[in-house]
């Protein structure tokens, strides 16, 4: 994702709509244990003079059926989508 770490954490609560526990600046887990998210830094994306911060975001869904997983991803994607998709 092209996002700074601080922006990611600020948007996450609305994106997942459930309580979570943050484990440092690199990971979090849902309070109910149904999902985990881990972050890793990637090199900035450079386009001419423009530099965009990037993060690798790994989402692990635990004990979710297909419908619940699709709903989680749809909400997550909608909250992190920016102009143009």
Image (cartoon, rainbow, N blue to C red):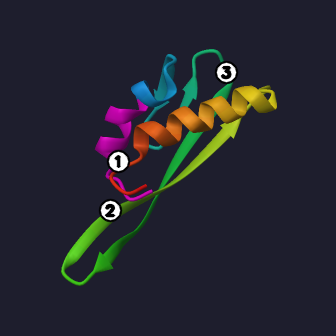
Marks 1/3: CA distance?
Answer: 22 Å
Horizontal relation, residue 17 to residue 32: left or right:
left
- Judge the density around disc 3: few (<14), some (14-19), many (≥20) Cα neighbours within 10 Å: few
Q: Which labelled disc corresponds to residue 33?
A: 3
Quadrant location of the C terminus?
bottom left
Residue at point 53% right, 32% down?
75
- Counting from the top left corner in percent of width and height, residue 25 is at 40, 41
Q: Which residue is mark 2?
A: 53
Front-most of residues 48 and 23 = 48
Q: In the picture, which quadrant includes the N terminus?
A: bottom left
Q: Main secondary structure of the magenta part?
A: helix
For residue 29, what is the image quadrant? top right
Which circle's residue, 1 or 3, is located before the other in the chain?
A: 1
Residues rendered magenta in the picture? 1-12
Question: Which residue: 30% across, 43% down?
Answer: 7
N-terminal of the two: label 2 or label 3? 3
| Secondary structure found at label 1 | helix
Which residue lies most toward the front here?
A: 84
Label number found at residue 5: 1
Tag 2's secondary structure?
Answer: strand
Q: Residue at x 46, y 30 (%)?
A: 15
Magenta stretch encompasses residue 17:
no
């Amino acid at each position: 994702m092209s996002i700074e770490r601080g922006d990611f954490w600020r948007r996450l609560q609305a994106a997942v709509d459930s309580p979570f526990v943050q484990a440092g600046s690199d990971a979090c887990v849902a309070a109910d244990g149904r999902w985990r998210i881990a972050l890793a830094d990637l090199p900035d994306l450079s386009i001419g003079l423009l530099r965009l911060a990037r993060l690798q975001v790994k989402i692990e869904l635990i004990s979710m059926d297909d419908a619940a997983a699709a709903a989680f991803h749809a909400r997550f994607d909608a909250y992190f989508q920016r102009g143009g998709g």
